[in-house]
Amino acid sequence: MSRRGAKPKPTKLKALSGTLRSDRLNPHEPETRPAVPRCPEHLGPEAKREWRRLAPQLARMGLLCKIDRAALALFCQAWARWIDAEEAPATPVRPPERTLPWPSGWRQPCSPSPPAPGTPGGGG
């Protein structure tokens, strides 16, 4: 059978909401201490910069502990990729050059196919 009722709240949330009672404390509740985990070596320079910016602030606010290392690394890597994409020059995508192979091995450029009927420039 499953547990009935709402999921139990952590003790810290009970204290914040003002519903903490000493007779309802969980003596076996796991407790984490705020800490700054080591920055993973595989992160690139931009991701490491973001790690150094965020990790101390999150730990000071009590929102980061050592077990959060992977989640923070994922965020920092995604941040770095986004920055790279934003800074990359916008290059137009060229369609591939269309050629026809000849038995001799030479490739002959072919003319673009005519527009389909019913499309702009395609006639009626």
Image (tube, rainbow, N blue to C red):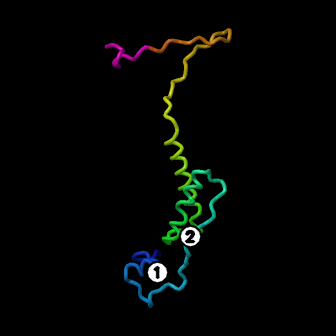
What secondary structure is found at the residue carrying circle 1? helix
Q: Is residue 79 above or below residue 4?
A: above
* Main secondary structure along the magenta-highlighted residues: loop
User: Along the line of sight, which residue is nearer the eye, 96 or 51?
Assistant: 51
Q: Few, some or many C-alpha atoms within 10 Å of disc 2 (few <14, some 14-19, many ≥20)?
A: some
Looking at the rendered structure, the secondary structure element under dot 2 is loop
The residue singled out by tag 1 in the image is 11
Locate residue 16, reporting x and y percent: 40, 79
Tell me the residue at 53%/86% (across/down): 27
> Quarter-wise, where is residue 122 in the image?
top left
Q: Which mark is residue 65?
A: 2
Tell me the residue at 55%/78% (across/down).
31
Q: Which residues are magenta?
A: 114-124
* Residue appearing at x 48%, y 70% in the figure: 61
Residue at the farthest left position: 124
In this orientation, which residue lies closer to the viewer: 17 or 76?
76
Query: Does residue 117 show up magenta in the picture?
Result: yes
